[in-house]
Amino acid sequence: MAIERTISIIKPDAVAKNVIGQIYSRFEAAGLKVVAAKMKHLSRKEAEGFYAVHRERPFFNALVEFMISGPVMIQVLEGENAVLKNRELMGATNPKDAAPGTIRADFAESIDANAVHGSDSLENAAIEIAYFFAATEVSAR
Ligand code: IDP
């Protein structure tokens, strides 16, 4: 299986709940390695740019407001099948539908405040990594 890299963002609700370490433990237990990380309070412009694909969706403004409501923890995860593996660890977008034992089932309150973001494809992972990290900020393989 291919070694991939993906973006994970621990959203403001989970940072406020003080569960960064618990979420990192799940990445590590699943064989995903943190190869870059930064805590950031996103500007409105950064959040709007990151979620530009959702610009026309009715929840866009609420999503941006939420993502700038407090600091987020952004990391690049590396490992076999990292994109899908991270999505599996996250669980469904709406925590009510998320499988037991997933991050969203255990730490998220609602579809608006759903604890984590994860790239949904290898192509988007590359775009999202470049959005937040310079090449020199990501550990070499
Ligand atoms: P994902 O985060 O599981 O990949 P996306 O469909 O890419 O889900 O949506 C991005 C984010 O927008 C979600 O994580 C969630 O916070 C928010 N979102 C998606 N759909 C809705 C909705 O129907 N109402 C409110 N917020 C939503």
Image (tube, rainbow, N blue to C red):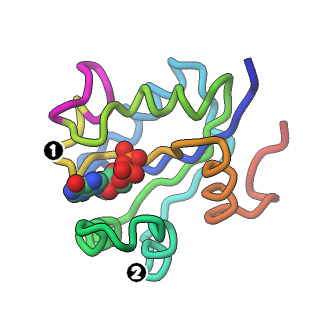
Whole-percent x and y of residue 138?
Answer: 74, 50
Residue extent of the magenta highlight: 96-104
Q: Amino acid at mark 1?
A: Glu
* Residue for point 68% across, 22% down: 80
Residue extending farthest to the front is 56
| Label 1 residue SS | loop
> In which quadrant of the rendered image does the C terminus lie?
top right
Q: What residue sits right under mark 2 in the picture?
A: 44
Is 27 inside the magenta-drawn segment? Answer: no
Q: Quadrant of residue 64?
A: bottom left
> Callout 2 environment at 10 Å: few (<14), some (14 to 19), or many (20+)?
some
In-front residue for pair 77/71: 77
Picture coordinates of residue 107, whole percent (x, y): 24, 37
Q: Residue at x 80, y 58 (%)?
A: 135
First in sequence: mark 2 vs mark 1: 2
Residue at (28, 20) in percent of width and height: 101
Q: Position of residue 86 (x, y in %)?
A: 50, 32
Q: Report whether 103 appears left or right of 8.
A: left
| Relative height, residue 73 to residue 101 (above, below) | below
Q: Which residue is mark 1?
A: 109
Q: Residue 100: horizontal and vertical position, in percent?
A: 23, 19
Assess mark 1: CB under 8 A from ligand 1? no
Q: Nearest the camera: 80 or 140?
A: 80
As drawn, 68 above or below 105? below
Q: Quadrant of the image for the N terminus?
A: top right
Quarter location, residue 121: top right
Secondary structure under tag 2 reads helix
For the question of whether residue 77 can be seen, the reply is: yes
Whether tag 2 and tag 1 are in contact, CB under 8 A, the answer is no
